[in-house]
Image (cartoon, rainbow, N blue to C red):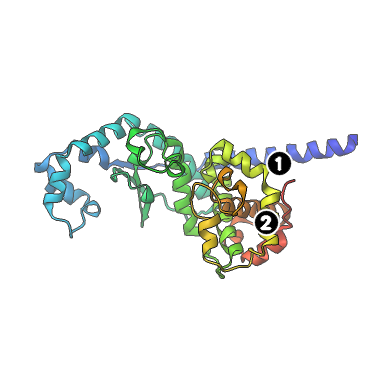
Amino acid sequence: MKYCVLFLFGVLLFSCNNESKVETEIEKIPMDVEIIRFDKEFANANPADLPKLKAEYPAFFPKQYSDSIWVEKLIDTLQDQLESEVVKKFPNDEKLDAVLVPLFQHIKYYFPKFRTPVVVTTTSDVDYRNKVILADSMLVIGLDNYLGNEHRFYEGIDKYISKEMKPSQIGPDVADTYARQYIKPPSKATFLGQIIYYGKELYLKDLWLPNISDAEKIGYTEEEFQWAEENEEYMWRYFVEKELLYSTEPKLGARFISPAPFSKFYLDIDNESPGMLGRYLGWKIVRAYMENNDTDVQQLMITDADELFTNSKYKPKK
């Protein structure tokens, strides 16, 4: 027994030292992030400044919209309130730098061809479906979607959505956007293929965002994450017994993968459960695969779901 404990201690110590070395290397990667505060420029502008703004930021002024639309927005009192709240929460670039610099360093370490984008912040009339947009070398962040999950501007938004509308969610949302650039889409439209796709996305967050909680990586509260942890075995048994893994039933996405107030097992536990539990189990499978196989993250991104699942030797936590 004594030798077993010593062995486990040695493995943990080696793992911690190895992770520490990796993080030290990542910190050495030079990273200069240019942040353009378009939200501030627009907030401080008046109608006479519109031609200059359009010339400097043509991407934010689609040609199909007439100037009268932008003039109206420049003098709109609700827009003024929105911009004022954004400046209160993000008065300078400090919070953004603290998130984006280490995130981009981590992406660069694991994917050396990564090119640092120009980051442009804006307000989006609280377009929470498009909080972060990547367009070529420009990363656009709608800061009005991160004012805090209890903000009065979010009162009409469902709680399962507004709970993620806080500054700490910027890192995970940007990571999501970049993860999609690297993960090969599933070759089959099976439930297994879909949950492993999202499992890979969450695994990249493990690598890229090592200092945030698992709950924040997936967009859960701590209580929701704890529920998933405690019910992992029961969920897995349900998916296996109902033969869902290789099903191509389209409704499974809405039931277990898409953001939702709860997952739909059609059981009494539904109202207690968080949404996206398919993503959670896909994450567990991908983690098991990486623990049990000698492979690198680039190879993981293109590994077929069936092969990954077979070689993961995944067993749910009891």
Whether residue 229 is situated above or below residue 302 in the rendered picture: above
**Within the image, what quadrant is residue 148 found in?**
top left
Q: Quadrant of the C terminus?
A: top right
For residue 90, side relative to residue 204 (left or right)? left
Residue 15 is marked as 1
What's under tag 1, amino acid-wise? Ser
Q: Residue furthest left?
A: 48
Q: Which mark is residue 120?
A: none
Q: Position of residue 42 (x, y in %)?
A: 21, 41
Numbered-mark total: 2
In x, y percent, where is residue 29?
50, 43
Residue at image point 8% right, 42% down? 48
Report whether residue 183 is seen.
no
How far across and how far down the image is residue 187, in percent?
Answer: 56, 70
Looking at the image, which residue is at 69% across and 50% down? 234
* Left or right of 209, for residue 98: left
Residue 238 marker: 2
Determine the image quadrant of residue 41.
Answer: top left
Residue at 40% over, 33% down: 150
Which quarter of the figure is the N terminus placed in?
top right
Classify 182 as above or below 139. Answer: below
Task: Please give left or right for residue 170 compared with residue 295 in the image.
Answer: left
Q: Within 10 Å of the Cα at label 2, are there few (<14), some (14-19), or many (20+) other Cα atoms?
A: few
Q: Nearer the viewer, residue 27 or 193?
A: 193
Q: Secondary structure at mark 1?
A: helix
Q: Secondary structure at mark 2?
A: helix
Q: Who is closer to the viewer here, 285 or 41?
A: 285
